[in-house]
Amino acid sequence: DHCVRRVRNSGKRYDLVLRTRPDVGIFKPFPWDKLSSDKVTYMQKDGGTNADWFFSMPWPTINRWWDKVAELYGHGFDGLPDYTMWGMTKDVEMTEANFPVVIVRGNRSAQCFRIV
């Protein structure tokens, strides 16, 4: 994943990495206190799975979990991330939270149906 590589190459160490897509909009003040400092924090979405487009990871989790996800897709796997990556979490602790975020598709189009 390009973003994680850039963070690593910066030489800085962060407590958390918040991963989001560029087309995600935050529609009210963000509840920073809901992000866990020692667990992957995710939110549910439609379709019976978790959102792959907005979540946070504690720094140590990158090595134990995210690297495996990125390697799988780097080798050509083409499965849907929101169904695949959350099935690869046996080695990490996770916690669920609700965030005021939604995928924005245009000036007047947001995918609010994805919020559970």
Image: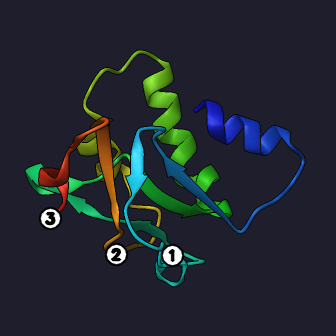
Say whether disc 3 or disc 2 marks the residue closer to the N-terminus.
2
Q: Which residue is mark 2?
A: 97
SS under mark 1: loop
Image-quadrant location for residue 27: bottom left
Q: Which residue is mark 3?
A: 116
Determine whether label 3 and label 2 are within 8 Å by CB.
no
Is residue 4 shown above or below 42? above
Q: Which residue is mark 1?
A: 35
- Which colour assignment does the render follow? rainbow
- Residue 51 picture location, percent across and down: 30, 52
Q: Name the residue: 34% across, 67% down.
A: 100
Q: Residues within 10 Å of mark 3 (few under 14, many from 20)?
A: few
Q: Amino acid at mark 2?
A: Ala
Which quadrant: the C terminus?
Answer: bottom left
Determine whether label 2 and label 1 are within 8 Å by CB.
yes
Compared across the picture, whether 18 is left or right of 106 comes to right
Q: Amino acid at mark 1?
A: Leu
SS under mark 2: loop
Q: Amino acid at mark 3?
A: Val
- Residue 6 picture location, percent across and down: 74, 36
Compared across the picture, whether 88 is left or right of 59 comes to left
Quote the CA–CA distance across marks 2 and 1. 8 Å
Quote the CA–CA distance across marks 3 and 2. 11 Å
Q: Name the residue: 44% across, 29% down.
A: 72
Q: Residues within 10 Å of mark 2 (few under 14, many from 20)?
A: few
